[in-house]
Amino acid sequence: MTPEQQFDAALQSDAPPLALAPMQDVTHLPFWRIMARYGGVDLFFTEYMRVHSVSKPERWIVDSIRQNPTGRPVIVQIIGNDIPAILRTIPLLQALPIAAIDLNLGCPAPVVYKKCAGGGLLRDLPLVDRLLGAMRDAIPGRFTVKTRLGFDDPVTDSLVPLLVKHHPDLVTVHGRTVLEMYRGGIHYGHIRQIAQALPCPVLANGNVSSPDMAEETLQLTGARGLMIGRGAIRNPWIFQQIRQHRAGQPITLPTGHQVLTYIQELWEETWHATSTGPQHVHSMKRYLNFIGAGITGDGQFLDRIRRARSQPEFFSICQHYLGHPHPMTLEPPAGLIQTGACGSDHR
Ligand SMILES: Cc1cc2nc3c(=O)[nH]c(=O)nc-3n(C[C@H](O)[C@H](O)[C@H](O)COP(=O)(O)O)c2cc1C
């Protein structure tokens, strides 16, 4: 099957499609390799690719697409508002083995939204109208959109007609406004409103951190499927657990030892030829910031990991908390969902 056929099959299957969210500096080749081992993901999104007057497709994103180790379809996400630059970039992306091109209408990082890109576009719906129209006309294959509900207030009433008019093949909705960033609850009712109004499948996104929350999100939103970000970094077993839960099977929880193995895999897969132990300890914190909340609810583990400087120190802390055979849910304590880093621009 071609990536597009795989994409269509995932969206038409009886089971709700499950997508790994685009995450800057996370959803690249090494992380995809690991997630593919744990299984259960139907659709993989790249982190956003910046498109502007002099941009070229970023090399590490192109490499991830070319070497896609997942066996599942990859959707490349772009961010920007320069229509000629986007039109110049589309054929370059279409030449890659992608299933679809996704437009980011949701990044809440001020450095991005102040340039009227990502979530900032939700303040300029006439420009969104032009962007969606230009992309729909220029993309011969599948075109998808990932959006938030609005900039400061939900704009679903005005956004939905634009989405209907330009008929993307899939829309993902993060159930918060841009200014809400990652704070507060998810506005399930607004996702439901969009899912009901659009003819295409909708993926609901936000705070899914357990099979129960996955079920609840599907029920509350009526969405066709789910996109999961931070919950997947914390618990790469979550996609399989959701499938087990829906099939009425017992959920397989990882043991402490298995979580430790996952951290070792992250260490090995993301190690570069030029890495040093202390540098790599530092770069591992981008994952441990999320994983940590599922290990000890009181922040003790994370606190110690954040102070770790060397490889032996890092792994001795991991061994101390995870060198046990007991099952772990890896759920964060209520109210503690870490903020995202979309647009942090620290590459
Ligand atoms: C580290 C990090 C990087 C992110 N980068 C992107 C990105 O490149 N594109 C995008 O559309 N969203 C990005 N997001 C947002 C996620 O795709 C997702 O919408 C958000 O984390 C909410 O879902 P969750 O609660 O399942 O994590 C990022 C989030 C995080 C935590």
Image (cartoon, rainbow, N blue to C red):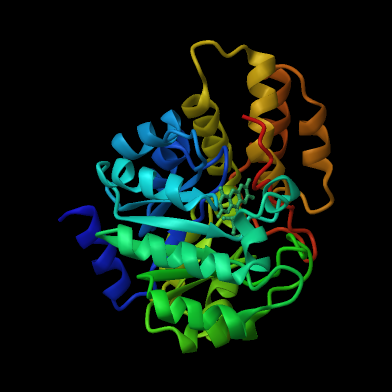
Above or below — where is 116 with respect to 173?
Answer: above
Which picture quadrant has residue 25?
top right
The percent position of residue 314, horizontal first and vertical second, equals 70, 25
**Which part of the image, by quadrant, shows the C terminus?**
top right
Above or below — where is 58 with respect to 241?
Answer: above
Of residues 143 and 175, which is closer to you in this image?
143
Of residues 137 and 65, which is closer to you in this image?
137
Residue at 26% over, 67% down: 8
Q: Is residue 12 visible?
A: yes
Residue furthest out toward the left = 1
Left or right? Give the position of 305 relative to 166: right
Residue at 57% over, 35% down: 263
Residue at 82% over, 27% down: 307
Of residues 75 and 185, which is closer to you in this image?
75
Above or below — where is 192 with respect to 255?
Answer: below
Of residues 44 and 112, which is closer to you in this image?
112
Left or right? Give the position of 70 relative to 18: left
The percent position of residue 40, horizontal first and vertical second, equals 38, 58
Q: Is residue 251 visible?
A: no
Above or below — where is 137 with respect to 32?
Answer: below
* Total labels drawn: 0
The percent position of residue 180, horizontal first and vertical second, equals 77, 65
Residue at 69% over, 78% down: 154
**Which part of the image, by quadrant, shows the N terminus?**
bottom left
The percent position of residue 168, horizontal first and vertical second, equals 38, 70
